[in-house]
Amino acid sequence: MKDDKGMGIDKTELFQKNIEYPYSASEKRKMLILNNMNKLKKGMAKVDVIKLMTQPDEANLTYKFKKAESDNVIGFSLAYILRRDTDSGSAIEKNEQLLRIHFDNSEKLIWSYSQDVDEFNAIEKE
């Protein structure tokens, strides 16, 4: 695998929190995320997104192709989970409520979407 510094994500720790399921964000965390989610703008730096939104629940690499190889890494995403019933299965099976924010390798926000958060103004993928 390539050195993470070559991918422009050297300061992005890839992780999934040790979450106990079923999971619901605390009311304080949920309100912070919901109150700030529509302040996100295309081109924002990862560090500014985290300052605005707080630490994410997950960070995952984004691949150009389905085959997960380091040469195919085109960025990463941060997930802010409001609700998830289980750690595996489809989004429907997990009963997820979350925001996923995608960044390119230069750590700039390029698009975002939500699962079951109707008030979120998604940033369209180009």
Image (cartoon, grey):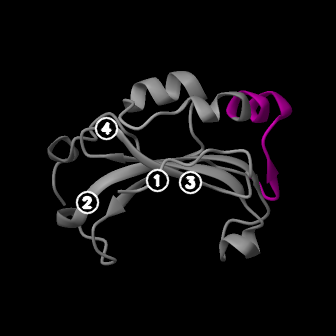
Question: Does residue 60 belong to the magenta stretch?
Answer: no
Considering only vertical position in the picture, is 120 above or below 30? below
Looking at the rendered structure, the kind of residue marked 1 is: Glu
Q: CA distance from mark 1 to mark 3?
A: 8 Å
User: Where's residue 57, x and y in %?
Assistant: 60, 44
Looking at the rendered structure, the kind of residue marked 3 is: Tyr
Foreground: 4 or 92? 92
On residue 107, the disc is 4
- Rate crowding at label 3 as few (under 14), some (14 to 19) or many (20 or more) other CA atoms within 10 Å: some
Looking at the rendered structure, the kind of residue marked 2 is: Val
Q: Earlier in the sequence, mark 2 or mark 4?
A: 2
Q: Mark 3 highlights which residue?
A: 113
Question: Which residue is drawn at the image coordinates 41% and 38% (left, top)?
Answer: 42
- Rate crowding at label 2 as few (under 14), some (14 to 19) or many (20 or more) other CA atoms within 10 Å: some
Range of magenta residues: 20-33
On residue 73, the disc is 2
Question: Which residue is drawn at the image coordinates 85% and 33% (left, top)?
Answer: 27
Pointer 1 with pointer 3, Cβ within 8 A = no
Q: CA distance from mark 4 to mark 1?
A: 17 Å
On residue 87, the disc is none
Q: Mark 1 highlights which residue?
A: 124
Mark 1 vs mark 3, foreground winner is 1
| Kind of element beneath mark 1 | loop
- Rate crowding at label 4 as few (under 14), some (14 to 19) or many (20 or more) other CA atoms within 10 Å: many
